[in-house]
């Protein structure tokens, strides 16, 4: 019908959270995830806002690694302001997905596709 109802949205969101292959369509997920990170509605995501969300999602053990994937080794942004705009966030997510995919997850993706058939 051209619209995403609540059940479709929940299914898409849950599938993206669980996706280890990078094969799930993620445009809507990325917009929603950014809006969840942007607690104050400023249109930018701070390191603190992101840290809180990633801690909730991944736990303490994976927090630092996930933060470095988004913000880099020094936990700073390219322009040094410590905040990600939506376009910077998308670039970081795409870069993160490419790194994960190139680090051996291509075999995982092929296995997941085989298993879905």
Image (cartoon, grey):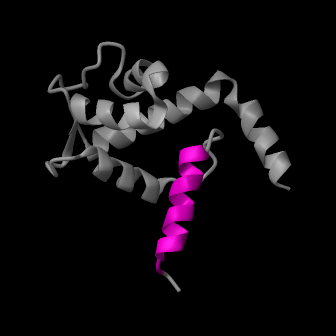
Residue at (35%, 38%) from the top-left corner?
53
8 shown above or below 43: below
- x then y, percent, for residue 78: 25, 25
Residue at (60%, 52%) from the top-left corner?
24
Residue at (81%, 39%) from the top-left corner?
111
Say which of 67 and 71 sits in front. Answer: 67
Q: Is residue 93 visible?
A: yes
Answer with the quarter of the image where residue 70 lies.
top left
Answer with the quarter of the image where residue 87 lies.
top left
Which residues are drawn in magenta?
3-18
Residue farthest to the bottom, as pictured: 1
Q: Main secondary structure of the magenta part?
A: helix
- x then y, percent, for residue 54: 39, 33
Say which of 29 and 85 sits in front. Answer: 29
- x then y, percent, for residue 55: 39, 31
Classify residue 9 as left or right of residue 56.
right
Q: Quadrant of the C terminus?
A: bottom right
Answer with the quarter of the image where residue 69 lies.
top left
86 shown above or below 54: below
Q: Is residue 25 visible?
A: no
Residue farthest to the top, as pictured: 74
Classify residue 52 as left or right of residue 54.
left
Magenta stretch encompasses residue 43: no
Residue at (40%, 19%) from the top-left corner?
64
Q: How many marks?
A: 0
Magenta stretch encompasses residue 10: yes
- x then y, percent, for residue 89: 33, 40
């Amino acid at each position: 019908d051209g619209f995403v109802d609540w059940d479709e949205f929940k299914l898409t969101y849950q599938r993206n959270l669980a996706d280890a292959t990078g094969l799930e369509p993620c445009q809507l997920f990325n917009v929603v995830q950014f809006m969840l990170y942007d607690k104050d509605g400023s249109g930018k995501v701070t390191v603190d806002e992101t840290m809180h969300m990633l801690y909730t999602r991944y736990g303490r053990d994976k927090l630092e690694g996930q933060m470095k994937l988004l913000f880099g080794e020094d936990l700073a942004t390219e322009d040094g302001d410590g905040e990600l705009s939506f376009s910077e966030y998308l670039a970081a997510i795409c870069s993160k997905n490419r790194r994960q995919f190139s680090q051996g997850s291509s075999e995982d993706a092929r296995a997941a596709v085989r298993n879905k058939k």
